[in-house]
Amino acid sequence: MQPTIILSEHHLERLETLIARQQPRTAAIEALEEELARAEIVPETALPADVIVPGRSARFVETGSGREYSYTLVYPHEADLAQGRISVLLPAGSALLGLRVGQSIDWPLTDGKALHLTVLAVEEA
């Protein structure tokens, strides 16, 4: 079961505009649309500080190994994987969208496997 996610009205509008501009349609775009469709939408002023949205950094721990990771979720023009800035248009980026501290996800890897990660902290980038 996927965790409940939260987004602000502002982020929803910006992401819907971004999706509308993407051609051709890809599986990653469809995955992002699915995330948006199941999100709880709140006013910008009601968005909790511990929710991962573009412009916020998050620290995670991998179940089993205890290894920690840190990534910043960003819009495509700001993406730089070498710097840990992951585009919301990537499958791994859309998987992070709207998560809160304490929630867990299966982070997709390029080989088809996944890491089970739990969000430890979220902060402004």
Image (spheres, grey):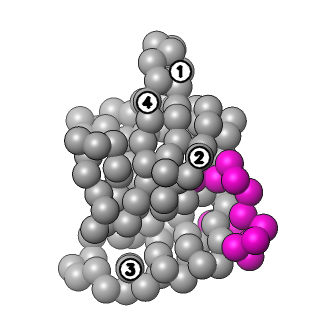
- Residue at numbered disc 3: 18
- Residue at numbered disc 2: 123
Alpha carbon separation for disc pair 1 and 2: 21 Å
Q: Earlier in the sequence, mark 3 or mark 4?
A: 3
Residue type, mark 1 in image: Thr
Which residue is depicted at the point 52% across and 25% down?
A: 61
- Residue at numbered disc 4: 69
Q: Nearer the viewer, mark 1 or mark 4?
A: 4
Q: Earlier in the sequence, mark 3 or mark 2?
A: 3
Q: Nearer the viewer, residue 2 or 50?
A: 50
Q: Earlier in the sequence, mark 3 or mark 1?
A: 3
Which residue is depicted at the point 38% across and 80% down?
A: 18
Q: Position of residue 55 (x, y in %)?
A: 48, 59
Q: Position of residue 90 (x, y in %)?
A: 33, 57
**Residue segment shown in magenta:** 38-52
Residue located farthest toward the right when viewing the structure as drawn: 46
Asked if the residue at tag 2 contacts the one at tag 3, i.e. Cβ–Cβ closer than 8 Å, the answer is: no
Alpha carbon separation for disc pair 3 and 4: 27 Å
- Residue at numbered disc 1: 63
Alpha carbon separation for disc pair 3 and 1: 33 Å
Q: Position of residue 4 (x, y in %)?
A: 68, 54
Q: Earlier in the sequence, mark 1 or mark 4?
A: 1
Q: Position of residue 43 (x, y in %)?
A: 74, 76
Locate the N terminus by quadrant: top right
